[in-house]
Amino acid sequence: MAESWPFLDTFEPNFRPLVVIELAKGTKEETIEWFTKRIVDKKANGGEYNMIFCAQLLVKPLVTENGDEHIYLVGASHFRLLLGAETVGLVKECHDNSMRTFTYSSRKTFKDFADDNHNFLTMAECQYIIKHELENLRAKDEKMIPGYPQAKLYPGKSIVRRLLTSGILVQIFPLHDREELKKLRHSWYGRVKVGYQPLDEIRCYFGETIALYFGFLEYFTFALIPMAVIGIPYYVFAWEDYDKYVMFATFNLLWSTVILEVWKRICAIMTYRWGTLLMKRQFEEPRPGFHGVLGINPVTGREEPVYSSIKRQIRIYLVSLPFVCLCLYFSLYVMMIYFDLEQWALDYHEANESNFSSLMLFVPSIIYAIVIEIMNRIYRYAAEFLTSWENHRLESSYQNHLILKVLVFNFLNCFASLFYIAFVLFDMKLLRQSLATLLITSQILNQFVESLLPYWLQKRHKKRTKKRMCSLKTDTDMSLVEQVNLEKEMGTYFGTFDDYLELFLQFGYVSLFSCVYPLAAVFAVLNNITEIYSDALKMCRVYKRPFAEPTANIGVWQLAFETMSVISVVTNCILIGMSPQVNALFIDSKTDLILTVALVEHLLLALKFIMAFVIPDKPRDIQIKLAKLEFESLEALKQQVRTTDMDNSEK
């Protein structure tokens, strides 16, 4: 079997498993041998192989007594990881405290580097390097995967992606470091404390994308505190006096702009310290689900699937767009049913005037909030299917189209009823009740579905797996076998999409209509505090460890939040214009009122964009450091050109 293959005996004595590869049970031996050989093959084989075709990694089969040999552990030598760090463009801190792209030739100039220091690269960075190498394993002259004629290959095709789409490869995931995870859990959520999250430790363990999410969650929670502090006295002393909410709405306008601009600066500071602000964007390869007729990429010159952009546009505008519009119409139809239920509950209360009838006034809003959450989740699956069917070539394009579909539907589904109550029914009391019910109910449901339920299911599965493992006897390290078997059955964390979406909707509840329900910010703060702990719990205990993904910002979500803040300017200006206090100033002419509100709204939008322009996205010191690095890079390039020219002239 696999353990007799000579090329698998090349791993170091201090082999450190970093990544797990799980193949389908019953995978043919010739397929396993070919795949593992391609992983461990060296470039030194007489120049036959190139780095793009071989990963030069270390592989060890995980074998138990029951003959389970479809799981393989992947690692790499320290030297290979350092070369990989240069390949992926990792940025590390130098002795002069500057951040520079790591190169193996200049490794001695980097802080904390030593030939015997295997902690120079974090475990997350090592796993990211291995993932990069595995994903860049490409076919040479093979026409198919050995043993599976139906799994076609062509030169340059990603081997891992073909194995995944063919069902031969079940999953690839990074292993947890149980000792480091234990330390992280203790400092992160092991005890209830008032303080900042260990973002640097989170980044070292989970990578920059997840650390940035938790950094944004923490920042947003602190940014909500002024709104919550101001909102409490408005709730206590002016519950029915909507005239006094004019000042609260005005503060809301400035607050929503300032916090997003300040976040850009904080994000730049963190990502510069982590090195991702300087990382150059990698050339994007086709996404795994992309398919088409085999052709030549005009940029890379490699063979890859080619799909007509006209066909894609037809799918988008003739199928996806009508479907989204149909879903939006259905959402509005459900909203009107909700208002019928509200009217029924109001009539019932007026007819009975009891405590029970008073409670019944909240039932329609609670039911509607639950229906909204169910519709959002069902639509999410439909949006993912449609976006995949559109056959986008790049992952970034796929994500942008998916986010647009989901945001449009979620925005209308969650906020349409509030807009209708505020600007059609003009019922501020019902608006306050609906906003409170929707916000609180959605927060409770999200906490249960995203954290509590998965944690409970994972604990049950863990107990069953431990019982099964205790009944096995094996010569392999029992703790490692147990760990792999536990982790491979854990849920997969699909990224920060749902987490950012939840914060986006929360930001909408707070910024759009919180002037009529000032406690919205208070409930948001309380929810986010528990969210920090529950999300930390699910990352450490519920899901498999995700691969680290370097990033310099929160991506398209920054634009989504900024768009929401622009909409909040419009809604709050209209709410201010509808207040009796402002209406009293324009008794004779409603036209003057409308024109004044429109003028104020335009002025506030202009002020918002001026503030966005005046407040730099990056602090001055970071701008100087970036400019200095760019200057040094240009000078080094010029020197290299001069040296080349001199060498050519001498020849």
Image (tube, helix red, strand yellow):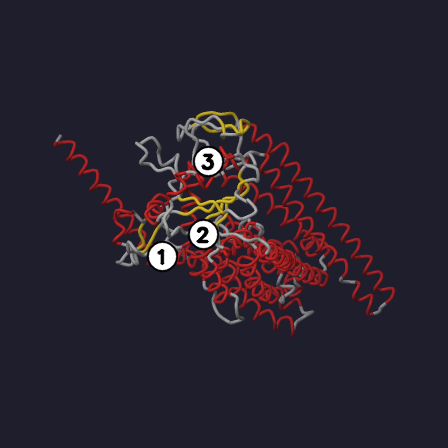
**Residue 641 in sight in this render:** yes
Mark 2 secondary-structure assignment: loop
Which residue is located at x 45 percent, y 57 percent? 205
Vertical position of residue 498 compared to residue 160: above or below = below
Q: Earlier in the sequence, mark 3 or mark 1?
A: 3
**Residue 573 in sight in this render:** no
* Residue 348 placement: quadrant: bottom right
Q: Looking at numbered disc 1 in the image, what kind of residue is underneath it?
A: Asn
Residue 81 in the image, given as x and y percentages of width and height: 36, 47
Q: Nearer the viewer, residue 86 or 310?
A: 86
Q: Where residue 14 is drawn, which disc sits there?
A: none
- Nearest to the eye among marks 3 and 1: give it: 3
Name the residue that disc number 2 marks: 553
Residue 362 in the image, given as x and y percentages of width and height: 75, 62
Identity of the residue furthest to the left in this view: 650
- In whole angstroms, how far apart are the C-alphas of marks 1 and 2? 26 Å
* Residue 639 placement: quadrant: top left
Q: Looking at numbered disc 3 in the image, what kind of residue is underneath it?
A: Glu
Q: Do the residues bearing badges 3 and 1 touch, measured as CB atoms within 8 Å?
A: no
Q: Earlier in the sequence, mark 1 or mark 2?
A: 1
Name the residue that disc number 1 marks: 119
Using a 10 Å C-alpha cutoff, classify the residue at mark 2 as few (fewer than 14 neighbours), some (14 to 19) or many (20 or more). many
Residue 364 in the image, given as x and y percentages of width and height: 76, 58
- In whole angstroms, how far apart are the C-alphas of marks 3 and 1? 32 Å
Q: Where residue 33 is drawn, which disc sits there?
A: 3
